[in-house]
Amino acid sequence: MLLSVTENLELATGSGDAWQLLRDTERLARLVGGVQSVEPIESPGTEAYRVVVMEKVGPFKVIMNLEVAITETVELQVLGATIKGSEPKGGSRATGTVRVELTPSPAGTAMRFIVNVEILGKLATLGAPVIRRRVNELFSDFGKRVVAEFAVGAA
């Protein structure tokens, strides 16, 4: 099952601050629901991370061990990555791409997340409507947390 999600956010900050958030892996990970841990993968010439995500989807509690590899960076404008991984017991797999685009806007910075992920295995058996609803909820919550990072009075 292929999932495509696009989230458009208006941030009350300049592109420099938004870019700093994208490049601060620990800070960004705290805004993503379900992230249990993030650790860099030591590999010459690449920027990649091991990420453990735990989330309840329908009747399943899903734990995914993911590898996120940065594939594209255009300073203050674009960050792209690939995602691949599976459950420890091999019941579900996910592969895909994430692209984040920053552009100036009247409010400060427009941030656009474009995610395309293929889900296979046990998780896919829940069906598209259940998974799409949960993924949309997760991205909506993530978007609210990102916006709140730059709200007036945020620390």
Image (cartoon, grey):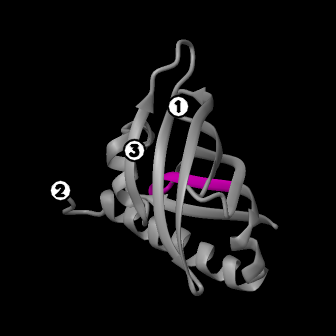
The reply to whether the magenta stretch includes residue 41 is no
Q: Find the residue positioned furthest to the right.
A: 1
Q: Residue at x 52, y 72 (%)?
A: 138
Q: In the drawing, does residue 113 fall left or right of residue 140?
A: right
Of the residues under marks 1 and 2, which one precedes in the sequence? 1
* Secondary element at tag 2: loop
Tag 2 residue = 155
Q: Nearer the viewer, mark 1 or mark 2?
A: 1
Asked if residue 141 can be seen in this view, the reply is yes
Q: In the drawing, does residue 55 fall left or right of residue 20?
A: right
Of the residues under marks 1 and 3, which one precedes in the sequence? 3
Report which quarter residue 82 is drawn in: top right
Q: Which residues are magenta?
A: 106-115
What count of labels does the image hold? 3
Tag 3 residue = 38
Circles 1 and 3: CB atoms closer than 8 Å: no
